[in-house]
Amino acid sequence: MTSNTLLRAARRTFIAGAAALLVGVVAVPSFVTPVLANDGPASVADLADKLLGAVVNISTSQTVKGTEGPGAVPMPQLPEGSPFQDFFDDFFKNRGGDKDSGAQKVQSLGSGFVVDADQGIVVTNNHVIADADDIEVNFSDGITLKATLVGTDPKTDVAVLKVDPKGHKLTSVKFGDSTKMRVGDWVMAIGNPFGLGGTVTVGIVSARNRDINSGPYDDFIQTDAAINRGNSGGPLFNSAGEVIGINTAIISPSGGSIGIGFSIPAQLASGVVDQLRQFGETRRGWLGVRIQPVTADIAESLGMATAKGALVAGVIKGGPVDNGTVQAGDVITKFDGKDIHEMRDLPRVVAESPVGKAVDVVIVRKGVEQTVKVTLGRLEDGEKAASADDNSTDQGKADKTPPVSTAAVLGMTIGELNDDTRKKFSIAADVSGVVITDVAKDSAAAERGIKPGEVITEIAQESVATPKDVMDRIGALKEQGRKNALLMLASKTGELRFVTIRMD
Protein backbone atom coordinates (compact mmCIF):
# COMPACT_ATOMS: atom_id res chain seq x y z
CA MET A 1 0.00 0.00 0.00
CA THR A 2 1.40 3.38 -1.02
CA SER A 3 1.87 6.27 1.37
CA ASN A 4 -0.99 8.16 -0.32
CA THR A 5 -3.30 5.19 0.20
CA LEU A 6 -2.34 5.01 3.87
CA LEU A 7 -2.95 8.76 4.27
CA ARG A 8 -6.42 8.51 2.70
CA ALA A 9 -7.32 5.59 4.96
CA ALA A 10 -6.19 7.46 8.04
CA ARG A 11 -8.27 10.48 7.01
CA ARG A 12 -11.38 8.30 6.58
CA THR A 13 -10.83 6.76 10.02
CA PHE A 14 -10.41 10.17 11.67
CA ILE A 15 -13.52 11.63 9.99
CA ALA A 16 -15.61 8.63 10.96
CA GLY A 17 -14.45 8.87 14.55
CA ALA A 18 -15.13 12.60 14.70
CA ALA A 19 -18.62 12.11 13.31
CA ALA A 20 -19.32 9.47 15.91
CA LEU A 21 -18.26 11.83 18.66
CA LEU A 22 -20.47 14.62 17.29
CA VAL A 23 -23.60 12.46 17.37
CA GLY A 24 -22.66 10.91 20.70
CA VAL A 25 -21.97 7.44 19.34
CA VAL A 26 -18.79 6.14 20.87
CA ALA A 27 -17.75 2.55 21.05
CA VAL A 28 -17.59 1.23 24.62
CA PRO A 29 -14.58 -0.94 25.39
CA SER A 30 -15.44 -4.49 26.32
CA PHE A 31 -14.05 -4.07 29.86
CA VAL A 32 -16.50 -1.22 30.73
CA THR A 33 -19.87 -2.38 32.05
CA PRO A 34 -22.73 -0.08 31.00
CA VAL A 35 -24.72 1.55 33.85
CA LEU A 36 -28.38 0.62 33.43
CA ALA A 37 -31.21 2.90 34.51
CA ASN A 38 -32.48 0.45 37.13
CA ASP A 39 -29.02 0.33 38.72
CA GLY A 40 -29.22 4.02 39.75
CA PRO A 41 -30.57 5.44 43.02
CA ALA A 42 -34.23 4.97 43.80
CA SER A 43 -36.55 7.65 42.45
CA VAL A 44 -37.86 10.30 44.85
CA ALA A 45 -40.77 11.15 42.58
CA ASP A 46 -43.43 9.66 44.87
CA LEU A 47 -42.07 11.55 47.90
CA ALA A 48 -41.84 14.83 46.00
CA ASP A 49 -45.35 14.43 44.61
CA LYS A 50 -46.72 14.01 48.14
CA LEU A 51 -44.91 17.10 49.50
CA LEU A 52 -45.10 19.67 46.70
CA GLY A 53 -48.63 20.75 47.60
CA ALA A 54 -47.58 21.86 51.10
CA VAL A 55 -44.71 24.06 49.88
CA VAL A 56 -45.67 27.59 48.89
CA ASN A 57 -44.17 30.66 47.31
CA ILE A 58 -44.15 33.82 49.40
CA SER A 59 -44.56 37.06 47.48
CA THR A 60 -44.11 40.37 49.31
CA SER A 61 -44.26 44.02 48.32
CA GLN A 62 -42.99 47.10 50.08
CA THR A 63 -43.52 50.76 49.27
CA VAL A 64 -40.31 52.79 49.37
CA LYS A 65 -39.24 56.17 48.10
CA GLY A 66 -37.95 56.04 44.57
CA THR A 67 -34.49 57.26 45.55
CA GLU A 68 -34.24 54.61 48.27
CA GLY A 69 -35.10 51.50 46.31
CA PRO A 70 -32.56 48.84 45.43
CA GLY A 71 -30.43 49.94 42.50
CA ALA A 72 -32.12 53.34 42.39
CA VAL A 73 -30.50 55.99 40.20
CA PRO A 74 -30.78 59.66 41.24
CA MET A 75 -32.44 62.05 38.80
CA PRO A 76 -29.82 64.01 36.85
CA GLN A 77 -29.60 67.77 37.27
CA LEU A 78 -30.67 69.36 33.95
CA PRO A 79 -30.28 72.94 32.75
CA GLU A 80 -33.41 75.03 33.13
CA GLY A 81 -35.60 74.76 30.05
CA SER A 82 -33.94 71.56 28.85
CA PRO A 83 -36.01 69.71 26.22
CA PHE A 84 -35.31 66.47 28.16
CA GLN A 85 -36.95 67.75 31.38
CA ASP A 86 -40.34 66.17 30.68
CA PHE A 87 -38.76 62.85 29.77
CA PHE A 88 -36.72 62.57 32.97
CA ASP A 89 -39.62 63.79 35.10
CA ASP A 90 -41.74 61.00 33.73
CA PHE A 91 -39.04 58.34 34.12
CA PHE A 92 -37.73 59.18 37.59
CA LYS A 93 -40.65 60.76 39.42
CA ASN A 94 -43.74 59.06 38.09
CA ARG A 95 -42.68 55.44 37.83
CA GLY A 96 -44.02 52.93 40.30
CA GLY A 97 -45.92 55.23 42.62
CA ASP A 98 -47.14 58.62 43.63
CA LYS A 99 -45.94 61.51 41.50
CA ASP A 100 -45.25 63.74 44.47
CA SER A 101 -43.51 61.26 46.74
CA GLY A 102 -41.68 59.28 44.07
CA ALA A 103 -42.71 56.10 45.92
CA GLN A 104 -42.42 52.74 44.22
CA LYS A 105 -43.24 49.13 44.95
CA VAL A 106 -40.37 46.76 45.67
CA GLN A 107 -41.25 43.09 45.38
CA SER A 108 -39.45 39.97 46.58
CA LEU A 109 -40.01 36.24 46.47
CA GLY A 110 -39.28 33.47 48.94
CA SER A 111 -40.59 30.11 50.06
CA GLY A 112 -42.60 28.64 52.92
CA PHE A 113 -44.63 25.61 53.94
CA VAL A 114 -47.99 24.84 55.55
CA VAL A 115 -47.84 23.23 59.00
CA ASP A 116 -51.55 23.43 59.89
CA ALA A 117 -54.06 23.02 57.08
CA ASP A 118 -57.12 23.59 59.28
CA GLN A 119 -55.85 26.91 60.67
CA GLY A 120 -53.99 28.03 57.53
CA ILE A 121 -50.62 28.37 59.30
CA VAL A 122 -47.57 28.92 57.07
CA VAL A 123 -43.93 29.01 58.21
CA THR A 124 -41.16 30.96 56.46
CA ASN A 125 -38.04 33.02 57.22
CA ASN A 126 -38.27 36.37 58.94
CA HIS A 127 -36.02 37.97 56.34
CA VAL A 128 -38.42 36.89 53.57
CA ILE A 129 -41.27 39.03 54.94
CA ALA A 130 -39.39 41.69 56.92
CA ASP A 131 -40.79 45.23 56.39
CA ALA A 132 -43.35 43.96 53.89
CA ASP A 133 -46.58 45.93 53.37
CA ASP A 134 -48.38 43.08 51.62
CA ILE A 135 -47.78 39.33 51.81
CA GLU A 136 -49.28 36.79 49.42
CA VAL A 137 -49.01 33.01 49.54
CA ASN A 138 -48.98 31.25 46.17
CA PHE A 139 -49.90 27.55 46.13
CA SER A 140 -48.77 24.93 43.66
CA ASP A 141 -52.27 24.70 42.13
CA GLY A 142 -52.16 28.37 41.12
CA ILE A 143 -54.29 29.74 43.99
CA THR A 144 -53.05 32.93 45.68
CA LEU A 145 -54.18 33.96 49.17
CA LYS A 146 -53.49 37.08 51.20
CA ALA A 147 -51.52 36.39 54.38
CA THR A 148 -51.44 38.09 57.75
CA LEU A 149 -48.41 38.10 60.03
CA VAL A 150 -48.81 36.06 63.21
CA GLY A 151 -45.35 36.72 64.65
CA THR A 152 -41.64 36.86 63.92
CA ASP A 153 -38.39 35.99 65.68
CA PRO A 154 -35.37 37.74 64.13
CA LYS A 155 -32.96 35.86 66.42
CA THR A 156 -33.74 32.55 64.73
CA ASP A 157 -35.02 34.09 61.45
CA VAL A 158 -38.43 32.40 61.76
CA ALA A 159 -41.81 33.91 60.85
CA VAL A 160 -45.35 32.54 61.05
CA LEU A 161 -48.11 33.60 58.64
CA LYS A 162 -51.82 32.85 58.47
CA VAL A 163 -54.09 32.49 55.45
CA ASP A 164 -57.85 31.89 55.31
CA PRO A 165 -58.25 28.15 54.70
CA LYS A 166 -61.94 28.43 53.81
CA GLY A 167 -62.74 27.66 50.23
CA HIS A 168 -59.33 26.14 49.52
CA LYS A 169 -58.14 22.74 50.66
CA LEU A 170 -54.63 22.99 52.07
CA THR A 171 -51.98 20.30 52.37
CA SER A 172 -49.71 20.38 55.40
CA VAL A 173 -46.47 18.80 56.52
CA LYS A 174 -45.15 18.25 60.03
CA PHE A 175 -41.87 18.79 61.79
CA GLY A 176 -39.62 15.77 62.32
CA ASP A 177 -36.83 15.06 64.79
CA SER A 178 -33.77 16.88 63.48
CA THR A 179 -31.60 15.48 66.30
CA LYS A 180 -31.76 12.05 64.65
CA MET A 181 -30.26 13.29 61.38
CA ARG A 182 -26.74 12.03 60.75
CA VAL A 183 -24.07 13.32 58.44
CA GLY A 184 -24.63 11.48 55.15
CA ASP A 185 -28.43 11.10 55.48
CA TRP A 186 -30.41 11.97 52.36
CA VAL A 187 -32.48 15.17 52.40
CA MET A 188 -34.79 16.93 49.94
CA ALA A 189 -35.22 20.70 49.57
CA ILE A 190 -38.29 22.20 47.93
CA GLY A 191 -38.59 25.91 47.28
CA ASN A 192 -38.86 28.80 44.88
CA PRO A 193 -35.33 29.48 43.56
CA PHE A 194 -35.02 32.62 41.44
CA GLY A 195 -38.82 32.90 41.36
CA LEU A 196 -39.14 29.85 39.09
CA GLY A 197 -41.78 28.10 41.20
CA GLY A 198 -41.72 24.79 43.07
CA THR A 199 -38.33 23.14 42.52
CA VAL A 200 -37.05 19.90 44.05
CA THR A 201 -33.39 19.24 44.84
CA VAL A 202 -31.80 16.34 46.66
CA GLY A 203 -28.59 16.04 48.65
CA ILE A 204 -27.23 14.87 51.96
CA VAL A 205 -26.59 16.31 55.40
CA SER A 206 -23.03 17.60 55.07
CA ALA A 207 -22.55 18.67 58.69
CA ARG A 208 -24.45 19.54 61.86
CA ASN A 209 -24.24 22.18 64.60
CA ARG A 210 -22.82 24.81 62.28
CA ASP A 211 -22.23 28.29 63.71
CA ILE A 212 -22.20 30.90 60.92
CA ASN A 213 -22.42 33.91 63.26
CA SER A 214 -25.87 34.91 62.08
CA GLY A 215 -27.49 34.94 65.53
CA PRO A 216 -27.20 33.91 69.18
CA TYR A 217 -28.66 30.44 68.63
CA ASP A 218 -26.78 29.26 65.54
CA ASP A 219 -27.04 25.48 65.24
CA PHE A 220 -27.50 25.00 61.50
CA ILE A 221 -27.78 21.83 59.47
CA GLN A 222 -25.41 22.08 56.50
CA THR A 223 -26.52 20.42 53.26
CA ASP A 224 -25.32 20.11 49.69
CA ALA A 225 -28.89 19.98 48.32
CA ALA A 226 -29.04 22.92 45.91
CA ILE A 227 -30.39 26.02 47.69
CA ASN A 228 -30.49 29.32 45.81
CA ARG A 229 -32.02 32.77 46.10
CA GLY A 230 -35.73 32.34 46.70
CA ASN A 231 -35.30 29.04 48.56
CA SER A 232 -35.26 30.95 51.85
CA GLY A 233 -38.05 29.82 54.14
CA GLY A 234 -38.59 26.56 52.29
CA PRO A 235 -38.49 23.16 54.00
CA LEU A 236 -35.70 20.61 54.16
CA PHE A 237 -37.25 17.13 54.33
CA ASN A 238 -35.93 13.79 55.54
CA SER A 239 -36.64 10.58 53.65
CA ALA A 240 -39.89 10.15 55.58
CA GLY A 241 -41.24 13.47 54.31
CA GLU A 242 -40.88 15.28 57.64
CA VAL A 243 -39.51 18.82 57.90
CA ILE A 244 -36.16 18.63 59.66
CA GLY A 245 -34.99 22.12 58.71
CA ILE A 246 -35.91 25.53 57.28
CA ASN A 247 -33.60 26.56 54.44
CA THR A 248 -32.14 29.92 55.39
CA ALA A 249 -28.68 30.78 54.09
CA ILE A 250 -25.98 29.81 51.61
CA ILE A 251 -22.31 30.51 51.20
CA SER A 252 -21.67 31.56 47.64
CA PRO A 253 -19.57 34.23 45.93
CA SER A 254 -21.99 34.34 43.00
CA GLY A 255 -25.33 34.06 44.76
CA GLY A 256 -25.97 30.60 43.32
CA SER A 257 -25.57 27.22 44.98
CA ILE A 258 -22.05 25.85 45.37
CA GLY A 259 -23.18 23.02 47.60
CA ILE A 260 -22.99 24.85 50.95
CA GLY A 261 -26.45 25.62 52.31
CA PHE A 262 -27.74 26.01 55.86
CA SER A 263 -31.06 25.13 57.46
CA ILE A 264 -32.52 25.98 60.86
CA PRO A 265 -32.98 22.61 62.62
CA ALA A 266 -36.57 21.59 63.36
CA GLN A 267 -35.69 21.07 67.01
CA LEU A 268 -35.11 24.83 67.34
CA ALA A 269 -37.67 26.09 64.81
CA SER A 270 -40.66 24.07 66.01
CA GLY A 271 -40.52 25.53 69.52
CA VAL A 272 -40.30 29.06 68.13
CA VAL A 273 -43.27 28.40 65.82
CA ASP A 274 -45.35 27.10 68.73
CA GLN A 275 -44.61 30.21 70.80
CA LEU A 276 -45.35 32.59 67.95
CA ARG A 277 -48.66 30.83 67.30
CA GLN A 278 -49.63 30.89 70.96
CA PHE A 279 -48.36 34.30 72.07
CA GLY A 280 -47.44 36.20 68.89
CA GLU A 281 -43.94 36.55 70.38
CA THR A 282 -41.20 34.42 71.89
CA ARG A 283 -40.95 33.65 75.60
CA ARG A 284 -37.52 32.19 76.20
CA GLY A 285 -35.94 31.00 79.40
CA TRP A 286 -33.32 33.25 81.02
CA LEU A 287 -30.54 32.36 83.44
CA GLY A 288 -29.21 35.88 83.97
CA VAL A 289 -25.47 35.38 83.52
CA ARG A 290 -22.74 36.67 81.23
CA ILE A 291 -20.57 33.89 79.91
CA GLN A 292 -17.34 33.31 78.00
CA PRO A 293 -15.54 30.24 76.61
CA VAL A 294 -13.51 27.89 78.77
CA THR A 295 -10.10 27.81 77.11
CA ALA A 296 -7.40 25.26 77.85
CA ASP A 297 -5.56 27.86 79.95
CA ILE A 298 -8.65 28.70 81.96
CA ALA A 299 -9.43 25.01 82.50
CA GLU A 300 -5.91 24.45 83.81
CA SER A 301 -6.21 27.46 86.11
CA LEU A 302 -9.47 26.11 87.52
CA GLY A 303 -8.08 22.61 88.00
CA MET A 304 -10.34 21.09 85.34
CA ALA A 305 -9.11 18.06 83.41
CA THR A 306 -10.65 19.21 80.11
CA ALA A 307 -11.77 22.53 78.64
CA LYS A 308 -15.56 22.31 78.53
CA GLY A 309 -18.62 24.22 79.61
CA ALA A 310 -19.42 27.92 79.88
CA LEU A 311 -17.53 30.19 82.26
CA VAL A 312 -19.72 32.64 84.17
CA ALA A 313 -18.11 36.05 83.77
CA GLY A 314 -20.83 37.97 85.56
CA VAL A 315 -24.31 37.82 87.06
CA ILE A 316 -27.08 40.20 85.96
CA LYS A 317 -28.54 42.26 88.77
CA GLY A 318 -32.10 41.24 89.51
CA GLY A 319 -31.75 38.04 87.47
CA PRO A 320 -32.73 34.49 88.47
CA VAL A 321 -29.31 33.71 90.01
CA ASP A 322 -28.61 37.10 91.60
CA ASN A 323 -29.16 35.37 94.95
CA GLY A 324 -25.74 33.73 94.84
CA THR A 325 -26.91 30.40 93.43
CA VAL A 326 -24.49 30.86 90.52
CA GLN A 327 -21.43 33.06 90.91
CA ALA A 328 -18.85 34.66 88.68
CA GLY A 329 -16.06 32.14 88.15
CA ASP A 330 -18.38 29.13 88.11
CA VAL A 331 -18.22 26.84 85.08
CA ILE A 332 -21.58 25.48 83.93
CA THR A 333 -21.10 21.96 82.53
CA LYS A 334 -24.68 20.67 82.46
CA PHE A 335 -28.08 22.37 82.26
CA ASP A 336 -31.34 20.52 82.89
CA GLY A 337 -29.71 17.21 82.01
CA LYS A 338 -28.07 18.49 78.82
CA ASP A 339 -24.29 18.57 78.58
CA ILE A 340 -22.72 21.96 77.86
CA HIS A 341 -19.71 21.12 75.72
CA GLU A 342 -18.88 24.70 74.76
CA MET A 343 -20.06 28.20 75.57
CA ARG A 344 -22.52 28.57 72.68
CA ASP A 345 -24.47 25.49 73.81
CA LEU A 346 -25.75 27.22 76.96
CA PRO A 347 -27.76 30.15 75.48
CA ARG A 348 -29.57 27.78 73.14
CA VAL A 349 -30.62 25.17 75.72
CA VAL A 350 -31.63 27.87 78.22
CA ALA A 351 -33.69 29.69 75.59
CA GLU A 352 -35.47 26.46 74.66
CA SER A 353 -36.54 25.95 78.29
CA PRO A 354 -39.92 27.22 79.56
CA VAL A 355 -40.09 30.41 81.59
CA GLY A 356 -40.55 29.64 85.31
CA LYS A 357 -39.19 26.10 85.08
CA ALA A 358 -37.00 24.91 87.98
CA VAL A 359 -33.93 23.18 86.56
CA ASP A 360 -30.81 21.50 87.88
CA VAL A 361 -27.57 23.19 86.87
CA VAL A 362 -24.24 21.41 87.31
CA ILE A 363 -21.37 23.81 88.02
CA VAL A 364 -17.69 23.56 88.86
CA ARG A 365 -16.82 26.01 91.62
CA LYS A 366 -13.19 26.24 92.76
CA GLY A 367 -12.51 22.79 91.37
CA VAL A 368 -15.50 21.11 93.04
CA GLU A 369 -18.51 19.93 91.02
CA GLN A 370 -21.91 20.62 92.53
CA THR A 371 -25.56 20.87 91.47
CA VAL A 372 -27.74 23.90 92.13
CA LYS A 373 -31.46 24.46 91.52
CA VAL A 374 -32.45 27.49 89.44
CA THR A 375 -35.86 28.85 88.46
CA LEU A 376 -35.67 30.48 85.04
CA GLY A 377 -36.80 33.99 84.25
CA ARG A 378 -37.89 35.37 80.88
CA LEU A 379 -35.19 36.42 78.44
CA GLU A 380 -37.17 39.29 76.96
CA ASP A 381 -37.45 40.83 80.43
CA GLY A 382 -33.83 39.99 81.18
CA GLU A 383 -32.53 41.85 78.15
CA LYS A 384 -34.00 45.05 79.53
CA ALA A 385 -32.42 44.39 82.92
CA ALA A 386 -29.04 43.58 81.36
CA SER A 387 -29.13 46.81 79.36
CA ALA A 388 -29.92 48.81 82.47
CA ASP A 389 -27.15 47.00 84.35
CA ASP A 390 -24.59 47.74 81.61
CA ASN A 391 -25.52 51.42 81.53
CA SER A 392 -25.53 51.84 85.28
CA THR A 393 -23.20 54.59 86.50
CA ASP A 394 -23.82 54.49 90.23
CA GLN A 395 -21.76 57.27 91.80
CA GLY A 396 -21.66 56.08 95.42
CA LYS A 397 -18.97 56.76 97.94
CA ALA A 398 -15.45 56.15 96.68
CA ASP A 399 -12.92 53.93 98.40
CA LYS A 400 -11.28 56.02 101.11
CA THR A 401 -8.39 53.61 101.87
CA PRO A 402 -5.07 55.47 101.92
CA PRO A 403 -3.04 54.89 98.76
CA VAL A 404 -0.11 52.48 98.77
CA SER A 405 2.86 52.05 96.45
CA THR A 406 2.38 50.47 93.05
CA ALA A 407 3.82 47.14 91.93
CA ALA A 408 4.87 45.49 88.69
CA VAL A 409 3.66 41.96 87.91
CA LEU A 410 3.12 39.88 84.76
CA GLY A 411 3.86 42.84 82.50
CA MET A 412 1.43 45.13 84.32
CA THR A 413 1.85 48.06 86.64
CA ILE A 414 -0.84 47.90 89.32
CA GLY A 415 -1.94 50.31 92.01
CA GLU A 416 -4.49 51.03 94.69
CA LEU A 417 -7.97 51.90 93.50
CA ASN A 418 -8.58 55.25 95.21
CA ASP A 419 -10.17 58.61 94.47
CA ASP A 420 -7.33 59.68 92.21
CA THR A 421 -7.20 56.53 90.10
CA ARG A 422 -10.99 56.34 89.86
CA LYS A 423 -11.08 59.87 88.52
CA LYS A 424 -8.11 59.33 86.19
CA PHE A 425 -9.61 56.23 84.53
CA SER A 426 -13.32 57.12 85.05
CA ILE A 427 -13.93 53.97 87.07
CA ALA A 428 -17.40 53.56 88.58
CA ALA A 429 -17.69 53.73 92.36
CA ASP A 430 -19.10 50.21 92.70
CA VAL A 431 -16.03 48.61 91.08
CA SER A 432 -13.54 47.24 93.60
CA GLY A 433 -10.12 45.63 93.32
CA VAL A 434 -6.67 46.67 92.10
CA VAL A 435 -6.37 49.05 89.15
CA ILE A 436 -4.04 48.40 86.22
CA THR A 437 -2.25 51.66 85.49
CA ASP A 438 0.07 50.50 82.70
CA VAL A 439 0.67 47.47 80.47
CA ALA A 440 4.09 46.75 79.01
CA LYS A 441 4.25 46.42 75.26
CA ASP A 442 4.70 42.83 73.98
CA SER A 443 4.03 41.45 77.48
CA ALA A 444 1.81 38.47 78.28
CA ALA A 445 -0.81 40.88 79.59
CA ALA A 446 -0.76 42.92 76.37
CA GLU A 447 -1.18 39.75 74.32
CA ARG A 448 -4.39 39.05 76.27
CA GLY A 449 -5.79 42.47 75.43
CA ILE A 450 -5.50 43.85 78.96
CA LYS A 451 -5.55 47.66 79.04
CA PRO A 452 -4.85 50.40 81.60
CA GLY A 453 -7.97 51.33 83.52
CA GLU A 454 -9.17 47.75 83.95
CA VAL A 455 -9.45 46.47 87.50
CA ILE A 456 -8.27 43.11 88.86
CA THR A 457 -11.04 41.90 91.17
CA GLU A 458 -10.00 38.26 91.62
CA ILE A 459 -7.01 36.02 91.02
CA ALA A 460 -7.67 32.27 90.92
CA GLN A 461 -11.15 32.98 92.31
CA GLU A 462 -9.81 34.81 95.37
CA SER A 463 -10.63 38.51 95.86
CA VAL A 464 -7.82 41.06 95.84
CA ALA A 465 -7.95 44.60 97.19
CA THR A 466 -4.34 45.81 97.22
CA PRO A 467 -1.23 45.41 95.05
CA LYS A 468 0.23 43.26 97.86
CA ASP A 469 -2.75 40.89 97.58
CA VAL A 470 -2.00 40.49 93.88
CA MET A 471 1.69 39.75 94.50
CA ASP A 472 0.84 37.24 97.24
CA ARG A 473 -1.67 35.39 95.07
CA ILE A 474 0.74 35.18 92.12
CA GLY A 475 3.47 33.90 94.44
CA ALA A 476 1.14 31.26 95.90
CA LEU A 477 0.14 30.02 92.46
CA LYS A 478 3.77 29.65 91.43
CA GLU A 479 4.49 27.66 94.58
CA GLN A 480 1.63 25.33 93.65
CA GLY A 481 3.27 24.71 90.28
CA ARG A 482 0.58 26.56 88.32
CA LYS A 483 1.63 27.81 84.89
CA ASN A 484 -1.25 30.24 84.42
CA ALA A 485 -2.92 32.85 86.56
CA LEU A 486 -6.69 33.24 86.15
CA LEU A 487 -7.68 36.89 86.51
CA MET A 488 -11.18 38.27 86.76
CA LEU A 489 -11.10 41.80 85.36
CA ALA A 490 -13.71 44.53 85.64
CA SER A 491 -14.15 47.24 83.04
CA LYS A 492 -14.57 50.88 84.04
CA THR A 493 -18.33 50.33 84.26
CA GLY A 494 -18.06 47.01 86.11
CA GLU A 495 -18.53 44.50 83.29
CA LEU A 496 -16.54 41.37 84.11
CA ARG A 497 -14.39 39.04 82.03
CA PHE A 498 -11.82 36.32 82.70
CA VAL A 499 -8.35 36.09 81.23
CA THR A 500 -5.41 33.77 81.84
CA ILE A 501 -1.81 34.95 81.84
CA ARG A 502 1.24 32.73 81.62
CA MET A 503 3.48 33.13 84.66
CA ASP A 504 6.69 31.61 83.29
Image (cartoon, rainbow, N blue to C red):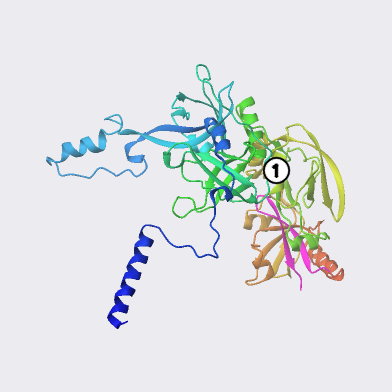
Verify whether residue 320 appears in magenta: no
Q: Nearer the viewer, residue 338 or 184?
A: 184
Percent x, y for residue 178? 67, 41
Instruction: Look at the image and tell me whether residue 393 can be seen.
Output: no
Measuring 59% from the left and 20% from the top, which residue is drawn there? 118
Measuring 65% from the left and 43% from the top, which residue is drawn there? 392
**412 to the left or right of 304:** left
Report which quarter residue 293 is drawn in.
bottom right
Verify whether residue 492 appears in magenta: yes
Percent x, y for residue 167? 50, 16
**138 to the left or right of 188:** left
Picture quarter with the C terminus: bottom right
Asked if 211 appears above or below 137 in the picture, the reply is below
Measuring 25% from the left and 42% from the top, which residue is drawn there? 75
Report which quarter residue 374 is drawn in.
top right
* Residue at numbered disc 1: 179
Mark 1 neighbour class, 10 Å CA radius: few under 14, some 14 to 19, many 20 or more: few
Count of numbered circles in the view: 1
Instruction: Look at the image and tell me whether residue 384 can be seen.
Output: yes
| Kind of residue at disc 1 | Thr
**384 to the left or right of 150:** right
Measuring 60% from the left and 42% from the top, which residue is drawn there? 264
Percent x, y for residue 129? 49, 34
User: Over which residues does the magenta segment extend?
Assistant: 482-504
Q: Find the residue positioned furthest to the front.
A: 1
Examine the residues drawn in magenta and state their main secondary structure: strand
Percent x, y for residue 195? 42, 39
Q: Secondary structure at mark 1?
A: helix
Picture quarter with the N terminus: bottom left
Q: Nearer the viewer, residue 205 or 355?
A: 205
Q: Find the residue positioned furthest to the bottom.
A: 2
